[in-house]
Image (spheres, rainbow, N blue to C red):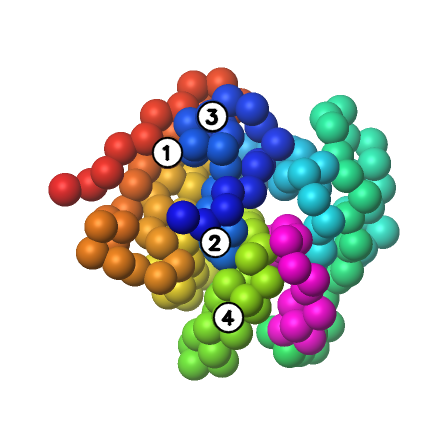
Amino acid sequence: MSERLRTGIDVLDRKLDGGIPSGSIVALVAQPASQAELFLYELTATRGTLYISVDRTGDFVSTSIESAETRTGDPSVRDVGGEAPLDDAAKLISTLPEDSNLILDPVDVLERQEPSRYRNFLNGLQNQIANTGSLAVLHCLDGNTVPPLRDTTEHCRTSSSWSCPTRSTSTPAATSPDLGRPAVTDLSSHHSHLAQRRFC
């Protein structure tokens, strides 16, 4: 059985039998005004974290984390807002140490890149997360213009997809007969009410 990595939210960790399996990639799907960043900020308190910002400067994200009214850690914050965000993110991810968190916030800009390059990026991400026993959370904004490759993010090589306020579907990083069906986790009321079930 794989090690479980805590999220830092006690009620969620209890519902998840101690946390999320190491080597997992989670897609956190949230409305822009949902304040899902608070979950990401809380996650930084659990272990070393590489926080990659795709649409805000690293300084802005660092300041937001420091001023958050929740328990946070001291993540390594980088931004990849340049001309080659997939390449820049991939280089940063290749340096991820073992037993770490990786946060991509938001992944929308990457989902608007050329499809085959984005799929290759996700495959490399999955390999790095699995090899390091880490946890990746891809923050997916669910606004008026959802990127065309959102289905790829939620399906291709991701362990789970959570919606905020919120419902989530999850599939394991390596699909097996007993784990190949998606699960749904309700994270509503700021993580206070949780329910998990398997689809038939």
Quick one: 83 or 100, which is closer to the camera? 100
- Which residue is tagged 4? 127
Crowd rating for badge 1 (residues with CA inside 10 Å; few <14, some 14–19, many 20+): many
Q: Quadrant of the C terminus?
A: top left
Amino acid beneath label 4: Asn
Q: CA distance from mark 2 to mark 3?
A: 17 Å
Q: CA distance from mark 4 to mark 3?
A: 27 Å
Quick one: 147 or 25, which is closer to the camera? 25
Crowd rating for badge 3 (residues with CA inside 10 Å; few <14, some 14–19, many 20+): few
Q: CA distance from mark 2 to mark 1?
A: 15 Å
Residue 187 relative to residue 95: left or right? left
Q: Quadrant of residue 8?
A: top right
Q: Earlier in the sequence, mark 4 or mark 3?
A: 3
Q: CA distance from mark 2 to mark 4?
A: 10 Å
Q: Secondary structure at mark 3?
A: helix
Disc marking residue 185: 1
Q: Earlier in the sequence, mark 2 or mark 3?
A: 3
Q: Secondary structure at mark 4?
A: helix
Membership of 31 in magenta stretch: no
Q: Position of residue 11 (x, y in %)?
A: 50, 22
In this picture, which residue range is highlighted in magenta? Answer: 89-109
Looking at the image, do the residues carrying marks 4 and 3 touch, with CB atoms under 8 Å apart?
no
Membership of 105 in magenta stretch: yes
| Residue 187 higher or lower than 156, as above or below | above
**Nearer the camera: disc 4 or disc 1:** 4
Q: Earlier in the sequence, mark 2 or mark 1?
A: 2
Q: Secondary structure at mark 2?
A: strand
Disc marking residue 14: 3
Q: Earlier in the sequence, mark 3 or mark 1?
A: 3
Amino acid beneath label 3: Arg
Q: Earlier in the sequence, mark 2 or mark 4?
A: 2
Q: Earlier in the sequence, mark 4 or mark 1?
A: 4
